[in-house]
Image (cartoon, rainbow, N blue to C red):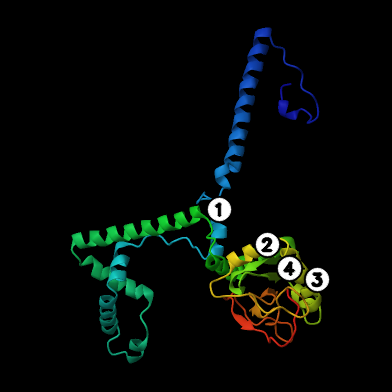
């Protein structure tokens, strides 16, 4: 063939005419290449699935970085510049310098003088004053800025490596952050799949004296005249068949010792509900965590914070706020 590129895709090429020596050399070369390719794939597989990529102690594991946000742990900002360290350590002096510079800039303009100097202006004042300092003093500020930045990063990496704290206070803090942590993830699931998302978390709740309780979060609404989320669609059935039934299961998954160890100091289980013997009633509810009219709700035990028309009150992801439900009205736990 003068033009191999014109050979039909499915036609077989004629076998090469090789001498015995050439055939042996070709086989040896192919074996070398095969071994090289095999080693490359094995290396890539080991790197992806290495034990250090999944174990809790790996601070650089992206999954650890993600889940650490549930506890409120955030990556520290980069180290300050030298003039920023100077600005931070001389707060009172900076106020005087900024006030004088602002007055000089807007001398005679009463309206402008009443305005608050912006961060960029304050930074310019600090930078100008910093440049007037002796070189030795500038170097000291730069050194302290670098040391503080390194210390914060070391503390952050240590917290990642140590893993989640098992204290009741730390666990309750994570429970409080569930709505803020899960809402963006669940919205992403909905946007990419076109499906609604629902998550329920249950176990011994520290602030309820270790009592078995649940927290649920739902993204999406139905097409009813007044659109509602899954948990708000048929509340009593949800409380009985979903969260109530789940709490019954959780009662078989935790011991009395587990509940006692999970309780915050000074707390005790809530008063049992008449409708669910052995399980406490829903005395508290967390305000909805909502970003748009598409509808997401984050509730602990009940949906009592929903408006009468089924719409949620908040248009952001706030920290959970707790409001007591009337103790006199029997409720089914969820």
Residue labelled with disc 3: 241
Nearer to us: label 2 or label 4: 2
Residue labelled with disc 2: 254
Nearer to us: label 3 or label 4: 4
Nearer to us: label 3 or label 2: 2
Q: Marks 3/4: CA distance?
A: 10 Å
Lower sequence index among marks 3 and 4: 3
Residue labelled with disc 4: 247
Characterize the local packing of mark 3: few (<14), some (14-19) or many (20 or more) Cα atoms within 10 angstroms: few
Q: Is residue 45 above or below residue 120?
A: above
Instruction: Give the SS element for disc 1.
Output: helix
Residue 141 location (% of width, % of height): 26, 62
Identity of the residue furthest to the top in this view: 20
Q: Marks 3/2: CA distance?
A: 20 Å
Instruction: Give the SS element for disc 4.
Output: helix
Residue labelled with disc 1: 62
Characterize the local packing of mark 2: few (<14), some (14-19) or many (20 or more) Cα atoms within 10 angstroms: few
Lower sequence index among marks 3 and 2: 3
Nearer to us: label 1 or label 4: 4
Residue 172 location (% of width, % of height): 57, 69
Discs 1, 3 touching: Cβ within 8 Å: no
Lower sequence index among marks 1 and 3: 1
* Left or right: where 31 falls relative to 127: right
The residue at the point 55 percent across, 66 percent down is 168
């Amino acid at each position: 063939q003068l033009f191999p590129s014109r050979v039909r895709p499915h036609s077989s090429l004629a076998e090469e005419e090789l001498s015995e020596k050439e055939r042996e050399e070709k086989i040896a070369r192919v074996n070398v290449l095969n071994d090289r390719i095999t080693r490359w794939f094995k290396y890539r597989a080991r790197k992806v699935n290495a034990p250090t990529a999944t174990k809790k102690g790996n601070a650089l594991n992206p999954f650890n970085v993600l889940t650490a946000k549930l506890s409120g742990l955030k990556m520290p900002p980069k180290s300050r510049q030298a003039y920023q360290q100077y600005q931070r350590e001389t707060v009172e002096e900076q106020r005087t310098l900024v006030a004088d510079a602002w007055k000089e800039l807007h001398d005679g303009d009463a309206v402008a003088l009443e305005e608050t100097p912006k961060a960029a202006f304050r930074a310019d004042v600090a930078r100008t004053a910093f440049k007037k300092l002796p070189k030795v003093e500038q170097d000291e500020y730069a050194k302290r800025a670098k040391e503080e930045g390194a210390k914060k990063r070391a503390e952050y990496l240590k917290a990642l490596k140590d893993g989640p704290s098992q204290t009741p206070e730390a666990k309750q803090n994570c429970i409080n952050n569930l709505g803020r942590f899960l809402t963006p993830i669940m919205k992403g699931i909905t946007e990419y799949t076109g499906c609604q998302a629902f998550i329920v978390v249950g176990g011994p709740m520290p602030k309820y004296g270790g009592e078995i309780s649940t927290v649920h979060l739902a993204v999406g609404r139905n097409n009813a005249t007044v659109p509602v989320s899954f948990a708000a669609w048929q509340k009593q059935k949800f409380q009985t068949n979903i969260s109530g039934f789940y709490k019954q299961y959780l009662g078989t998954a935790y011991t009395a010792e587990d509940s006692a160890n999970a309780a915050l100091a000074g707390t005790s289980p809530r008063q049992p509900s008449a409708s669910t013997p052995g399980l406490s009633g829903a005395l508290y509810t967390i305000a909805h965590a909502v970003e748009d009219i598409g509808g997401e709700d984050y509730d602990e035990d009940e949906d009592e914070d929903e408006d009468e028309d089924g719409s949620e009150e908040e248009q952001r992801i706030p920290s959970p706020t707790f409001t007591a439900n009337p103790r006199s009205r029997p409720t089914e736990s969820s």
